[in-house]
Image (cartoon, grey):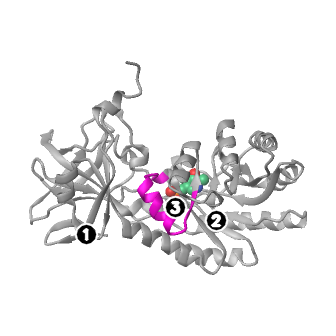
Amino acid sequence: MLNYRNNRLFVEGVPVSRLGKRFGTPLFIYSKKRIEDNYNAYRNAFSSVKNLICFANKSNSNRALLKILKNLGSGVDITSGGELYRALDAGFNPKKIVYAGIGKTEAEIIYALKSDILMFNVESIEELELLNRAAGRLKKKALIAFRINPNVDPHTHHYITTGKSGSKFGIPYEQAVAFYCYATTLENIEPAGIHCHIGSQITEVKPFLLAAKRVKKIIDELSLCGIRIRYADLGGGLGIRYRNENAPTPKGLARALSGVLKGFRGTIILEPGRSIVGDTCVLLSQVTYRKRVADKNYLIVDAGMNDLIRPTLYEAYHDIVPAERPARAKVRLDVVGPICETGDFIGKDRMLPWLGQGEFLAAKCAGAYGFSMSSQYNSRTRAAEVLVDGSKAVLIRKRETYADLVSKERR
Ligand SMILES: *Cc1c(COP(=O)(O)O)cnc(C)c1O
């Protein structure tokens, strides 16, 4: 989706510098084709089993992107009432929505029950009991999966490790059967699934395999007590290549899991976020100033940590490339934003041309946890988003205005 032609950087058939001039910067630029290809890779990889791919809305919840996925037949994994609203607003079939989250409020649970979503991924007894009472009042039966914590180490950043003991998520796998037995005693609960999600940006298949084995073992134990699991939801978490990672493909994941899940007759649910949208987008910015301090070189750009917080929050690496690349000597430099924090950087110690004021540069792989984690910190207006489809580009989210910054506040 991203390539140089005559030394100009293109997303599909459109030069990014043209989009920068037309829509301004900072600007998130997405490739429609890449989103479709990434989704289809999952569908094809798991085509030999019943499957439901539920895109993890929290990685990117732009309505236009959700509609692309909906039109391909995707479901959604939501983590809040707001994400449910977005999924319904984008036209998703509620029966393709699964709801994760350790702290669903009563209002959120009622909203999801009234919307007739497919399944609640439950993480505690108190949540289960609240769900049972709420479903009873609405005269509904709630399909549930328990999110189990399989205690496997996914070897990723500790902030995005979620399936190891000591994490706040899920219930310990050793207690799963007891939880299910209790669930069968509740009138408005139907235990129909099992769920786990062990972390994010996972670059090997082994942790998925270990988790799937634990899940399968519980499914087998439950079937001995007459509890039939119809949905095995293995979460998301497949990594992508930001720098030099060799993350497994959906096909590699499917191959690794095929042995363990042989004999499971139900539907496999997956909840990929990053691996669907991560590599479909660049964050375009423009050089505001250059400066040299204490023999360090800085390119000060107009995108900051409010637009892309991953570098400072997760020590994440985003490759940065110039939008135009005539042959120029490279220097070692930091690409930093305008915000009053030392943690405000896009990339450190990069070899890049000493670009001039006004030149464009692109941070790659900004599609997942980029815009969705952006904020107005420093009272910066949130960036605009553009979708490229072949040689066409459409604005899919307007740049916020200064008036937006104060619109909810008391006059
Ligand atoms: C965040 C999250 C996902 C998506 O993770 P990715 O790494 O973006 O694929 C899936 N399921 C749950 C429950 C999550 O919290």
Pointer 2: residues within 10 angstroms few (<14), some, or many (20+)? many
Q: Quadrant of ligand 1?
A: bottom right
Q: What residue type is disc 1 on?
A: Ser
Give the Cα distance between marks 2 and 3. Answer: 18 Å
* Local SS, label 2: strand
Q: Residue at x 9, y 65 (%)?
A: 326
Q: Which mark is residue 202?
A: 3
Residues tagged 1 and 3 counted as in contact (Cβ below 8 A): no
Using the rendered image of the protein, determine whether residue 199 is visible from the camera's viewpoint: no
Label 3 environment density (alpha carbons within 10 Å; few <14, some 14–19, many ≥20): many
- Which callout, 1 or 3, points at the residue further toward the start of the chain? 3
At label 2, which amino acid type do we have? Answer: Ile
Residue assigned mark 2: 269
Q: CA distance from mark 1 to mark 3?
A: 34 Å
Residue stretch rendered in magenta on the structure: 59-76
- Could you tell me which secondary element the residue under label 1 belongs to? loop
Which residue of the protein is positioned furthest toward the bottom in this rendering?
A: 48
- Residue at the location (25% across, 41% down)? 337
| In the foreground, 374 or 116 | 116
Sequence-first tag of 2 and 3: 3
The mark found on residue 391 in the picture is 1
Place of residue 111 in the rendered image (x, y in percent of width and height, measured from the top left): 65, 43
Observer-side mark, 2 or 1, equals: 1
The image shows residue 46 at horizontal and vertical percentages of 59, 76
Q: Is mark 3 within 8 Å of ligand 1?
A: yes
38 to 17, vertically: above or below: below
Q: Position of residue 48 (x, y in %)?
A: 63, 81
Q: Quadrant of residue 331?
A: bottom left
Q: Amino acid at mark 3?
A: Ile
